[in-house]
Amino acid sequence: MSQQDLQLQQDATALYEAVNQLVRLYQFRDRDLICCHDVSVTQCYALEFLAEHGSLRLQQLAELMLLDKSTSSRVVDSLVKKGYVTRIAETDDRRAVALTATDTGVALYQQIRAELIAQEQQLIAHLSPEMRQASIEVIRALGVQVKQRSTNSCAVRPCSD
Amino acid sequence: MSQQDLQLQQDATALYEAVNQLVRLYQFRDRDLICCHDVSVTQCYALEFLAEHGSLRLQQLAELMLLDKSTSSRVVDSLVKKGYVTRIAETDDRRAVALTATDTGVALYQQIRAELIAQEQQLIAHLSPEMRQASIEVIRALGVQVKQRSTNSCAVRPCSD
DNA sequence: GTATTTAGTTGCAACTAACAACAAATTGAG
DNA sequence: CTCAATTTGTTGTTAGTTGCAACTAAATAC
C-alpha cells in the first residue's frame, strides 16, 4: 500500500470514529431538551419544518420528517399543547388541517437555531474558507450516505439475513 | 458586517444545517440494524467498547456508554443471547462479572467497522489531506461540543427556565 | 347515491431507557 | 469476629417514543 493510500485509510478511520462519537453523543440530546428549551429534538425538527415552510398538512410534515403520520400527529399534539403550533381546519377540504407555527413557536425555533449557529461559528472561525467548505461538504455527504443507507437496508452489500 | 464575517456566518449556517440533517437521519439507524447485522446501534456501541477495551465490568461499560447500569445490563443480555459477549464471574471479587466480546463478537464488530470505514474512505478520497484533516477536526469538535452540552444543560447561556 | 379514496386520530404493541428495590459479595468498624 | 455499610449487578416498574392497524369524517369517482 502506498503512503497516500495509507494516509487515506487512516483519515477514513479517524472520520469514522469522529462521526461515531458525534452521533452517539447526540442521542442523549433526544431525551433532554434542546439546550434548555422545552421541546424535544423531534419536536424541534417539526417546529423547524413548520417555521421554514410556513404551513403544512400533517401528511406533508410526516413525509418531510420521515415519520409515520400517527407519530407526527402526536408530535404536533405536544407542540399545540405548548402553544408553539396551531391546528386550523382548512375551509375547502375540511378533513385537512393546516399546521402553522405560532409567533411564539417561530421565535423559539429562531432562538434555538441562532444559538446553535453561533456555536458552529465559534467552531469554524479559525478555519480557512476552503477548509470550512470541505468540512461542510463532508458532513453533507455523510447525511446523503445515511439517507441512502436507511432507504436501502444496506449500502455495502445486499442483506444477508 | 465585513465580507469575511458574512461568509463565516453563512458557513456556520450551512454547517448547522448539514449536521442537523446528518444527525436527524442517523436516528433512523437506531431502530434498524447496523447495515444488515443483527445488532442495534446501542448494542454495536457496547460491542465496540468491549472489543476495543478487551474486557470490562458492567459498571465501567455503563460509564463509557453514558447509560444506566440497568440499561447496560440488558444491552449485554441481548449480546450474550446472540453469542457476541460472555459474562464470566471474576474469581477475586465474585460480585463482579467480566464482560468479554467473543471471537464472533469481535469479528462482527470488525466487519461492521470495516464496512463503515470503507464508506468514509470513498467519501473523502477526492479531498486533499488538508481538507480531510479539517473535516475530521470539525466533526471531532462538534462531538466535544455536544458532550459539554449534555453535561452542562446549556452551553450558550445558563438555563433560563 | 353509493363505493372508494384521502386526511387525520386513536388503540395497541414493541422497544428503549431510567429509577428504585433488591440479592449477593466485599469491606470496614468496633 | 460480627454486624453494618458499601459495592456489583439484576429485576420490577414506569415513562416515553414509534409504527402498524383500525377507525371516523370528508371528499371524490363512477
Image: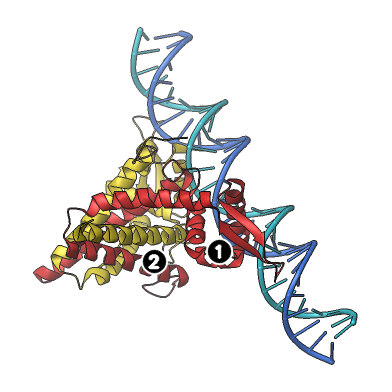
Chain colours: A yellow, B red, C blue, D cyan
The spot of residue B92 in percent (x, y) is 70, 71
State the quadrant of the N terminus of chain A: bottom left
Looking at the rendered structure, whether the residues under marks 2 and 1 are on a common chain is answered as: yes
Label 1 environment density (alpha carbons within 10 Å; few <14, some 14–19, many ≥20): some
Q: Residues within 10 Å of mark 2 (few under 14, many from 20)?
A: many
> In the rendered view, would you say A100 is above or below B88?
above
User: Where does label 1 land, which residue?
Assistant: B55
Residue B61 visible somewhere in the drawing: yes
Q: Position of residue A32 (x, y in %)?
A: 48, 61
Question: Which residue is drawn at the image coordinates 37% and 41% (left, top)?
Answer: A150
For numbered disc 1, what is the local secondary structure?
A: strand
Expressed as whole percent of the image width and height from the top left, the position of residue B48 reads: 47, 57
Q: Earlier in the sequence, mark 2 or mark 1?
A: 1
Query: Label 2 is placed on what type of residue?
Result: Val
Residue at screen point 56% across, 68% down: B60
Please tell me the numbered disc located at residue B132.
Answer: none
- Closer mark to the observer between disc 2 and disc 1: 1
- Which residue sits at x=31%, y=59%? A15
Label 1 marks a residue whose chain is B
* Foreground of the two, B81 or B105: B105
Q: Is residue A74 visible?
A: no
Please state if B10 lies on the left or on the right of B155 as rendered.
left
Q: How many labels were placed on the picture?
A: 2
Q: From the viewer's side, name the closer residue of A100 and C11.
A: C11
Residues under labels 2 and 1: Cα distance?
28 Å
Q: Position of residue B42 (x, y in %)?
A: 50, 53
Which amino acid, by three-letter code, is at mark 1?
Ser
Which numbered dot is residue B146?
2
Q: Relative to residue A40, is residue A144 drawn left or right?
A: left
